[in-house]
Amino acid sequence: MEFFIDTADINEIRELAATGLVDGVTTNPSLIAKSGRQFIEVIKEIAEIISGPISAEVTSLEYGGMVAEGRKLAALADNIVVKLPLTPDGLKACKTFSDEGISTNVTLCFSAAQALLAAKAGATYVSPFIGRLDDLAQDGLTLIADIVEIYNAYPDLTTKVLVASTRSPLHIVEAAKMGADTATIPPAVLRAMFKHPLTDRGLEAFMADWEKTGQTIL
């Protein structure tokens, strides 16, 4: 499973990229606004840090604007993925970009029917938002299972399932068990994946025993 980090915070991206565990980055207008910086400037800087896919979202709501913005974003770096909303205009733009060889991430997916349309439009990634479904007392992970099942039934559909709006390590683990290709993970959730009380307790015991030996490795 690919791990993308869901943030526009350059310091977070640098720190987590240094672990070697980050395959890409996803951003959105909300994350860019939170950074307080210029959109294009942030995307360019991320591209200098991360060699994997970087999702940069268009802000136009109509086809012509999406295509113009998407082409500008794609020209910023070779690894830019143009992020598009799952709307009729968004899918039309997705098909245009697919024909032009520009990678896309179709976002705000909340149903298997929408995911099937995104795949038909040639999306590189589709982003089902599981946490937001959970907020409405719907099972977001069931949506992941449905999309993976549909895509696996048709080998000619090459769209990757990018699990979005993840809220906990359990979301990541369960989605991985279902065969999702990618997850985009908030920094806090990725850090939580390292943690287990037995790991901390075991390391503490090992180090206490080592100290008793009076030895050093160097």
Image: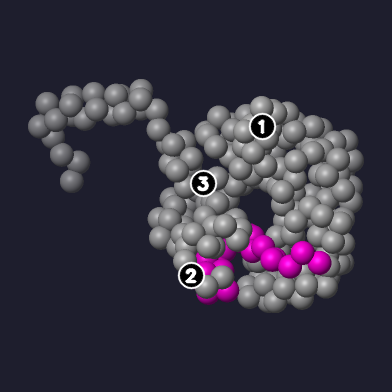
Q: Which residues are magenta?
A: 40-62
Can you give x and y, in whole percent of width and height, for residue 184 in the image? 59, 47
Location of residue 160 in the rendering, given as x and y in whole percent from the top left corner: 74, 47
Q: CA distance from mark 1 to mark 3?
A: 20 Å
Residue type, label 3: Pro
Which numbered disc, 1 or 3, marks the residue that appears first in the sequence? Answer: 1
Secondary structure beneath label 1? loop
Q: Is residue 4 above or below residue 49?
A: above
Label 2 close to label 1 by CB (< 8 Å): no
Amino acid type shown at disc 1: Leu
Q: Which residue is mark 1?
A: 136
Camera-nearest label, 2 or 1: 1
Place residue 74 in its image quadrant: bottom right
Horizontal side of residue 150 vs 56, given as left or right: right
| Residue bearing the label numbered 2 | 37
Q: Which residue is mark 3?
A: 186
